[in-house]
């Protein structure tokens, strides 16, 4: 298979040629909705809680629809006289303001439409739980407001793949690849382990230490990445923990969510607002049968290692170096 590169990066989906900005993602989803009836049905069933008795053949999908003094909507989906959905799409863990959404639902084209089902969708990378917890609004001017995550749209595309035609399957494969490259979602097929160092004490005013959070509660958390201290943007599939000079345990990440106040999940930690943090739910601990020392890693250093290397290397730093070479990172 020939390889296509764009600005030095390999292109694995045609949608990547558009880019990864908010409008680019909206355009990609709009195109897929228009070209895959199976995807459209799955998405409307999710967004509108419909019973699939709608006349999808008359569906209109509009991108970047402008109305004087009422802004520009990202995506509009309308089935005349039946359904009208406005979607405001965001990249990252950012929820749109109530003022912005109010502007959209007060558009004359939306207010005057005779659709039986009308909804406003806030589409972001925020998890469903996070959005519901931090989005206090449930409706705007009497129009139901539904927060959805890009992960849920990704899941729609995966479900639609099963019932789609061959042409739809090709399109949805491209879309799924695109989502997995640009969105904040756990890479369930990755065998990379993110190894962090745990301090042996307790932070000031905490009634619990880092080691107990992992060993007794099977939890771990860190800031949502994106330039802050080098933390991951995407939740890893495996976490590893080192302290007392060696690798202590490995865990599969069974699930994750996002929080801002640690006290909600850990009463031993004072109430605070930290900004978005990933909270990992860890599976049972496992580890190599021999001691794997830390090696040449600075005390608080965090590294990525392929899972198999941790069972063959003598130190974590050796496993890191093997992984870097294998992945072409060094």
Image (spheres, grey):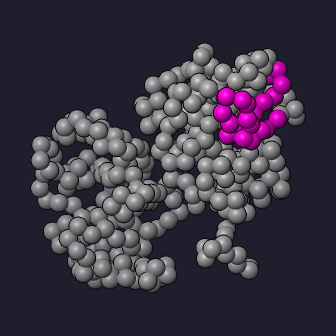
Is 76 colored magenta in this rendering?
Answer: yes
Residue 247 picture quarter = bottom left
In terms of depth relative to the viewer, which is nearer, 168 or 22?
22
Is most of the magenta stretch helix, strand or loop? strand
How many numbered circles are shown? 0
Residue 54 higher or lower than 160, as above or below: above
Q: Nearer the viewer, residue 320 or 69?
A: 69
Is residue 177 shown in magenta?
no
Using the rendered view, name the quadrant where residue 269 is placed. Answer: top left
Residue drawn at the location 60% of the way across and 15% of the way down: 142
**Quarter in which the C terminus is drawn:** bottom left
Q: Position of residue 267 (x, y in %)?
A: 21, 36
Please say whether residue 282 is visible from this viewpoint.
yes
260 w.r.t. 164: above or below: above
Quarter holding residue 319: bottom left
Q: Percent from the top left, x then y, of residue 79?
A: 81, 28
* 175 with respect to 232 (left or right): right
Quadrant in the picture for the N terminus: bottom right
At x 78%, y 30%, the residue is 78
**Looking at the image, is 328 positioned above or below residue 269?**
below
Residue occupying the point 66% across, 56% down: 176
User: Could you say where residue 2 lies in the image, as x and y percent from the top left?
Assistant: 74, 80
* Magenta region, residue range: 60-82
Q: Residue furthest front?
A: 69
The image shows residue 18 at horizontal and vertical percentages of: 70, 59
Observer-nearest of 240 and 262: 262
- Residue 180 visible at all: no
């Amino acid at each position: 298979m020939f390889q296509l590169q764009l600005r030095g990066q390999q292109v694995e989906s045609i949608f990547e040629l558009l880019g990864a900005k908010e409008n680019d993602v909206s355009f990609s989803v709009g195109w897929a909705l228009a070209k895959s009836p199976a995807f459209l049905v799955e998405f409307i069933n999710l967004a509108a809680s419909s019973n699939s008795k709608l006349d999808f053949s008359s569906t209109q999908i509009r991108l970047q629809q402008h109305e004087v003094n009422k802004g520009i909507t990202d995506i509009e989906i309308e089935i005349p006289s039946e359904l009208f959905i406005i979607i405001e799409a965001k990249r990252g863990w950012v929820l749109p303001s109530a003022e912005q959404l109010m502007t959209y639902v007060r558009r004359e084209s939306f207010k005057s439409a005779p659709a039986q089902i009308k909804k406003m969708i806030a589409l972001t990378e925020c998890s469903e739980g996070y959005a519901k917890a931090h989005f206090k609004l449930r409706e705007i001017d009497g129009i139901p407001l539904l927060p959805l995550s890009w992960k849920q749209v990704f899941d729609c595309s995966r479900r639609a793949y099963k019932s789609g035609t061959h042409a739809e399957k090709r399109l949805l494969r491209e879309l799924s690849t695109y989502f997995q490259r640009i969105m904040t979602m756990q890479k369930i097929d990755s065998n990379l382990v993110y190894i962090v160092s745990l301090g042996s004490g307790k932070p000031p005013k905490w009634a619990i230490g880092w080691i107990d959070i992992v060993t007794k509660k099977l939890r771990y958390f860190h800031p949502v990445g994106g330039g802050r201290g080098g933390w991951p943007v995407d939740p890893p599939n495996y976490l590893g923990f080192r302290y007392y000079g060696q690798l202590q345990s490995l865990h599969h990440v069974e699930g994750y969510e996002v929080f801002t106040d640690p006290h909600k999940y850990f009463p031993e930690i004072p109430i605070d607002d930290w900004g978005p943090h990933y909270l990992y739910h860890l599976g049972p601990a496992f580890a190599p049968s021999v001691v794997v020392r830390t090696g040449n890693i600075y005390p608080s250093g965090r590294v990525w290692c392929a899972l198999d290397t941790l069972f063959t290397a003598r130190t974590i730093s050796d496993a890191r170096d093997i992984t870097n070479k294998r992945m072409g990172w060094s």
